[in-house]
Image (cartoon, rainbow, N blue to C red):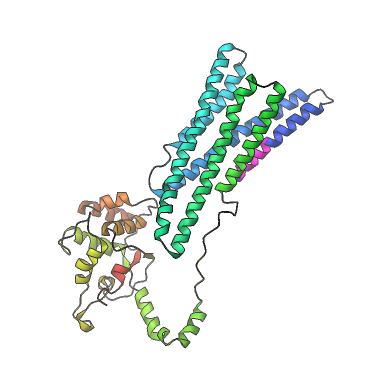
């Protein structure tokens, strides 16, 4: 973004210098040569700035694709590449042949064709930004507190970035649409003035668009940050005053924190579910986490040795009563499919940051579980420890 901004304003400075040389003259009678050199440099910088601005748009849309987990761009990278290539061919090759009548027709055809490219890029960008923005706007009212504030902030950011992209596309379209009119409708002096105005507007629009996409402007207010957690000293002071926050409370916190389990143990448990060994009614496509807790986790963690004949957390059973600190903490919804919970954890172990749909497909079969286990073993991820309330909290309490 910084390089792109520098290229834009270096191009503007080049045009201004070229005009100054033309107007002021040169005592060595070399103003034509100097002007041509500055013109060539400025024009090269202009084409480079076009490419860089649209390349930034491509990078932003591809980043949205990665976080969204599905295609949003329709191969926009190749569309932008074709647009820039067409621009170079028309302005360098075709314009140099303008003295021939046939090449004038070719140039008019090129002018019409690359008016279409910014429109295509604008439509693709609208779709790419609107899909996640509309989802955030639908989901935000269902949330409360910090999650809602972050969802609303993310929607505002996407809206601002969409406006920035449309501003860049509109200024580019306006600049290109005036080019064929300048040579046919206006005089040369009027055409140069209009071309300069359109160029200035396009440069300003591109700079504003880059600044908005990079988060330079503070009008996209960041969400409120959660209050800082109390330090250990403050916590100890509160513990000494509050009888509920005494040594027994601290002991229980440490016990809960030590109820982690390995990814390998989770896969063993899930494989038992698929084989109907621990839950005969398990259906990977339908069973929720709540179903698994009631019909598998509670029965497997029941213990006659505990007070009242209840049981312990299943992670305690897996760890033979030994404390195990987790490396990851997972939040989830008990009404969601248990398959998706396991798929998300396995995807984390495989360092898949996009989506877990491919992992979920593999988890539908015992053979797929075995293949995932081999991949996790290759990554050394079977020993990663997690904390999930369904397994780490005593469901008998």
Task: Name the residue at the right extreme.
Answer: 27
Q: Is residue 118 visible?
A: yes
Vertical placement of 153 versus 61: above or below?
below
Q: Is residue 390 left or right of residue 75?
A: left
Q: Is residue 120 left or right of residue 103?
A: left
Q: Outermost residue, front direction?
A: 141
Tell me: residue 70, above or below residue 328: above
Q: Which residues are magenta?
A: 2-11
Residue at (22, 81) in percent of width and height: 306
Between 88 and 131, the one lying in front of the other is 131
Instruction: Return the residue found at the far top.
Output: 101
Q: Considering the whole magenta stretch, tell me its main secondary structure.
A: helix
Q: Is residue 41 visible?
A: no
Residue at 22 percent across and 73 percent down: it is 301
Q: Is residue 6 magenta?
A: yes
Quadrant of residue 19 within the rendered picture? top right
Q: Quadrant of the C terminus?
A: bottom left
What residue sits 46% from the left and 45% below the top? 129
């Amino acid at each position: 973004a910084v390089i792109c901004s520098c290229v834009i304003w270096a191009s503007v400075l080049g045009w201004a210098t070229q005009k100054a040389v033309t107007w002021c003259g040169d005592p060595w009678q070399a103003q034509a040569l100097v002007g041509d050199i500055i013109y060539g440099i400025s024009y090269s910088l202009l084409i480079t700035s076009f490419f860089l601005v649209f390349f930034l748009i491509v990078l932003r849309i591809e980043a949205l694709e990665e976080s969204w987990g599905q295609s949003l761009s329709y191969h926009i990278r190749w569309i932008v590449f074709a647009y820039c290539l067409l621009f170079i061919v028309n302005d360098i090759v075709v314009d140099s042949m303008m003295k021939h009548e046939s090449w004038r027709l070719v140039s008019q055809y090129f002018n019409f064709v690359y008016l279409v490219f910014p429109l295509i890029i604008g439509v693709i960008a609208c779709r790419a930004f609107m899909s996640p923005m509309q989802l955030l706007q639908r989901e935000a009212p269902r949330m409360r507190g910090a999650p809602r504030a972050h969802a609303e902030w993310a929607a505002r950011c996407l809206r601002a970035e969409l406006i920035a992209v449309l501003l860049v596309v509109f200024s580019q379209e306006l600049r290109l649409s005036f080019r064929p009119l300048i040579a046919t409708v206006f005089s040369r002096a009027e055409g140069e003035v209009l071309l300069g105005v359109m160029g200035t507007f396009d440069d300003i629009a591109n700079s504003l668009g880059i600044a908005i996409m990079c988060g330079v402007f503070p009008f996209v207010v960041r969400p409120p940050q959660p209050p800082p957690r109390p330090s250990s000293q403050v916590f100890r002071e509160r513990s000494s005053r509050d009888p509920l926050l005494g040594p027994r409370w601290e002991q229980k916190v440490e016990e809960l924190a030590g109820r982690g389990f390995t990814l390998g143990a989770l896969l063993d448990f899930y494989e038992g579910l698929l084989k109907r060994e621990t839950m005969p009614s398990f259906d990977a496509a339908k069973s929720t986490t709540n179903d698994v807790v009631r019909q598998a986790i509670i029965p497997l963690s029941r213990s006659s040795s505990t007070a009242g004949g209840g049981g312990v957390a299943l992670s305690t059973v897996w760890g033979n009563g030994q404390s195990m600190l987790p490396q990851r903490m997972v939040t989830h919804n008990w009404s969601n499919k248990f398959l998706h919970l396991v798929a998300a954890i396995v995807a984390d172990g495989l360092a898949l940051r996009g989506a877990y749909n491919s992992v979920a497909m593999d988890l539908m079969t015992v053979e797929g579980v075995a293949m995932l286990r081999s991949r996790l073993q290759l990554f050394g991820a079977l020993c990663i420890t997690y904390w999930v309330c369904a397994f780490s909290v005593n469901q008998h309490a």
